[in-house]
Amino acid sequence: MATQSLMRRLPPVSVVIASLVLAIMLILVIFAPLIAPMDPRDVASYSLMDMEIPPVFMEGGDSRFLLGTDNQGRDLVSVILFGLRISVVIGLGAVVFAAMLGVVLGLIAGFFGGMVDGIVMRVADIFVSFPTILVALLISGIARAQLSADAMLAWAPLVLIFSIAINEWVQYARTVRASTMVEIARDYVRAAKVIGLPSPRIMARHILPNIMSSVMVIATINLAGAILTEATLSFLGAGMPPTYPSLGTLIRIGNQFLFSGLWWIAVMPATVLVILVLAVNVIGDYLRDHFNPKLMAT
Amino acid sequence: MIRLLSVRLLQAILVMVAVTAIAFVMFRFVGDPVASMVREGATQAEKDAVRVALGLDKPVLAQFVNFLGQVVTGDLGTSYRYQQPVTSLLLSRLPATLELVIVATVLALSLGIPLGVLCALKPHAFFSRLTQSATLVGISMPTFVTGLLLILIFAVNLRWLPSSGRGDLVDIGLWQTGFLSLSGLKSLILPSITLALFQLTLIMRLVRSEMIDVLSSDYIRFAFARGLPRTYIYGQLALRNALMPVVTVTGLQIGQLIAFAIVTETVFQWPGMGLLFTNAVGYPDVPVLAAYLLFVGFLFVMINMIVDILYTFIDPRLRTR
Amino acid sequence: MKTSIKTLLAGLALLTPLSAPAFAETLRWASSGDVISYDPNAQVDSFTQSVHHMVFDPLVRRNKDLKLEPALATSWEVIEPKRWRFKLRQGVKFHEGQPFNADDVVATIQRQIDPGARNRENLSTVVGVEKVDDYTVDLILRGPYPLLLNDLAAIYIMSKPWMEEHDALKPGNASTGVVTYASNHANGTGAFKLKSYEPDSRSVFEVNKEWWDKPQHNLDEVEFRPIASDATRVAALMSGEVDMIAPVPLQDIDRIAATDGLKVVENPSLRTIFFVFSYRPELHATPGQPNPLRDVRVRQALWQAIDTNTIQKRLMRGKSRTAGMLVAPAVTGYDEDIDVPLPYDVAKAKALLAEAGYPDGFKTGLACPNDRYIADEQICLAVASMWAQIGVQANVSVESKTTYFPRTDKGEFDIYLLGWASLPPMDGFSPLQALLATNDGTFGGSNADGLSNPEIDKLAYAASTELDEAKRIEDLKQAFRITHDEVLYLPLHQQPVAWAMSSKVDMPQFPDEYVRPWFAQIRK
């Protein structure tokens, strides 16, 4: 009875719409350089003469700039497309990195048990001792102080992926460890061990496939969180640099103009960000209820 | 039992040592405070003198040993920026953050639990669906966007509430409270709503799923079969059981809230520990950063340990582990 | 439980009335930064020093025209080049009642030149102080020094008995871990008393009814709040939570000015914004190749390729003052004949580059902070796209001041943006000594990129001891003339200082960006 009501709770219509929105966004992200009217990273492609033009539908709009321009004369459609691209890449990157790290460590801990298990899980305890946002702030702060500004430009996305993922792997590791311990007690794994198959092979061939569905569900739910964390870091000024902005950076820049009547500089990227995260959340919610109602997003 | 407790305690100490090491390593590399500490046009000799005075010219290991010694004696150094002992600085900001977190938690619980129950009892009602969708939007909005929206609407346009700060404070001993003045209470409203929103969503969803689980369990069905009154079943039997995990999660979330307060405090210029931290990052005020990290680490370790120990009391199966 | 209720009741009993006290006039203002400490010797922050001036008086101070005038000293004379004698004002009292006399000056100066004082370089030429009688003191100098009065205008006099009582005779210093009572308490002779101080939150001042000077304000109380975020600060003004904000972001000026009941006051400030060139043998952008910036024609070309007009009109919204030299008009050593920017001329710039052997331009780094100067990051991006027109390919890097300024010290940039206000002395000697003179350990403290011009060095050392003011000013001007002709630095503009306030507030504005509430009037 409970499962039925859960499944019926989210009308599939919303999930379909969310998937559609997400698909469109992914296409936009992949083809951003082809679609965007200009490349916001090329300083020669924009001019101060075009700064702070409102969106087309407002008085004073310019047909060249559908959503208006920012305080440097950059076309908002283009910066948002490129910003969306960065936000998605960092979000996906962080989730993939965290999942890989978590799955490998979880497998090892669960498979070998004993000392190995103890060490891995205590390390995990240390990492969950700190909120993601705090750790990420610190790591990106160190990176910015240690790398030259040029190097930071190139490395910023990787630094962000690393600093977000470093805290998120624990959840995967714990789930995978628990499932591995269940699987390892089963006859087929025991049999594989008896006939002397190498451990990595047993883990990859026999255990991994059985735990992938939980990992996928956690990953989807965490994707929304990772994108939000990146946006928050960038908003606090510890994320992507303004010359290579993500959606969060754009909102931070726009925030300075929020009360100056230039609302579109902040509101446009913020809307796109909320739509993106909402779409991911709708899908994640559905997946969780559908596959694994017991998983909690804590 | 004693063995288990001592193992947990030992683990907690180990974790704290690791945290101290991380705090130290991180902060030696966050940036160079010397440039913020000398006047415009300072000579190289002046800059070097400051560097020597701060001990930044010594080898990293020597600096770490020095730092460890300080931490053990409870002396976390002097803030570069505020010229005050870091410990008293952090303590003076504690009331602001705690009041914010407490109000946010109360808000989240007092709204989250009824809404969660409602959504569990009447999952198909229009109101339940609306609440469900609203919470999805809620967790999809970054905290800073919510905060800015609230400022824009209630402070700038409607002018009902202040946009920043804590208002007038009243001293009760060492504790400065905003609860006892009108402007203090008004100042609390927007930041606490912003901070509560995320937790509210979490609690609501948790209560809902726990309630659904409990309601489908055998003893509730049995109670219905016996013809016990509905209010008694829902209120006394079901809710009480569904609330157990909520209490745990809320406890664990308080640490998370203090961290999340960093963003809220920055948006609302709320003079708590989070704002202290973001201001310290920009300086960089290394002793403050290190102390904050240690404080949050300590808080988390304590909360985790207490929750673990409580579990072993509640659930006898864990005692034999 | 019972005890906690008791404490609560005790707290309630002490509680001041919930409604605002019945003060006639309170000025509530907000700025982007907070006071770092109330210890005058524990920091070097010019904003903090400006707030201190409300509470403390110096021996000499700046008047409404920023000219020096007597304050706690009524007169002075140079007895010999190394000994200055000051006559002190009589009948002055500190806020807590202690009478002011020569002992306070001696204790203050000793505290100021203590090796542990963070700002001791602000009075670096003074080596000693002697009490002559109760109202006369002598300052002993290292050598002849023309700028002593300018320096003294930023030295705030503290009370000796008060410091003794609170064990604060030695200055607080974060780097050595010394914390004193004076860090968060203040007892001066100034126009306002510090009533309460909550770091990062607010400082409240009340009028000093026994001030020795005739007040030119009508305030009873001043409340200062630091609000770092531009948008939040503007919101606080718009919602009526504060009466004044300083600074106001440029993009909000027009809207605030058009709002009923609010007004904006703006002027060019002293802070000149300019580009610094690397004079090292190679640029970081092109290792292994000779540095093109060492050729004066290349530097001229870069200047002529900048459309200063567009930057002034668009980026700075018409509020900045385009500059041709490193100091603003109010600073000693300024000369309007030197203050002439090279004209914007792309063709000429290209020709100069070709002449220097770079017909197709070259590659360079261009660095900017993004949280220090007005529109700093935008300026860099705009200049990069202007330089692209003459083939110079500038890789822009932008970062926070926290990491930016350490890098400027280490010479990690090819070309970078810098601002210089020549404060506190308000004298051209400040950039001459720190930026233009060769970095030899004494001079050239902010010249980390190998600039060295023997003629300028000679002028700098001559000016440092020249007591004949006319000759000294000529030395300064000569150095600035060379700087201009050789394009040693590339000046852009003086950035504006803009404040927004309720139209009931009259607050005079100064190019040194000090807020001086002792000149403020609030109309009913």
Image: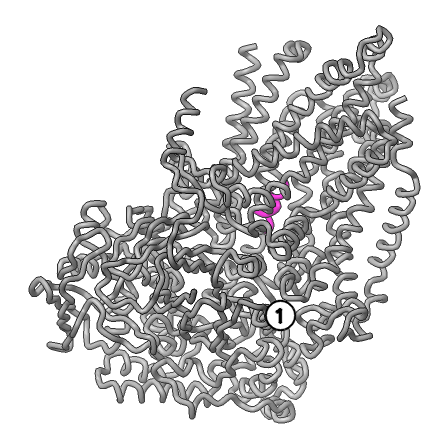
Mark 1 crowdedness (10 Å alpha carbons): few <14, some 14-19, many ≥20 = many
Residue C113 in sight in this render: no
Task: Name the residue: 43% across, 90% down.
Answer: C338
Q: Quadrant of the C terminus of chain C?
A: bottom left
Q: Is residue C498 left or right of residue C512?
A: right
Q: Which residues are magenta?
A: A132-140
- Residue B255 x, y percent position in the rendering: 58, 33
Up/down of C460 relative to C46, above or below? below
Q: Residue furthest top?
A: B226
- Residue C20 x, y percent position in the rendering: 43, 49
- Residue C335 x, y percent position in the rendering: 39, 89
Task: Name the residue: 63% across, 32% down.
Answer: B253
Task: Name the residue: 38% across, 60% down.
Answer: C48
Element type at mark 1: strand
Q: Tag count in the figure? A: 1
B314, B112: nearer the viewer: B112
Q: Which residue is mark 1?
A: C396
Q: Quadrant of residue C3?
A: top left
Q: Is residue C191 left or right of residue B106?
A: left
Up/down of C78 relative to A9, above or below? below
- Residue A99 x, y percent position in the rendering: 75, 38
Up/down of B223 relative to C139, above or below? above
Q: Main secondary structure of the magenta part?
A: helix
Which kind of residue does numbered mark 1 sit on? Answer: Val
Q: Is residue B194 magenta?
A: no
Tell me the subunit letter for badge 1.
C
A27, A235: nearer the viewer: A235
Task: Name the residue: 60% across, 80% down.
Answer: C311
Q: Quadrant of the N terminus of chain C?
A: top left
Q: Is residue C98 left or right of residue C508?
A: left
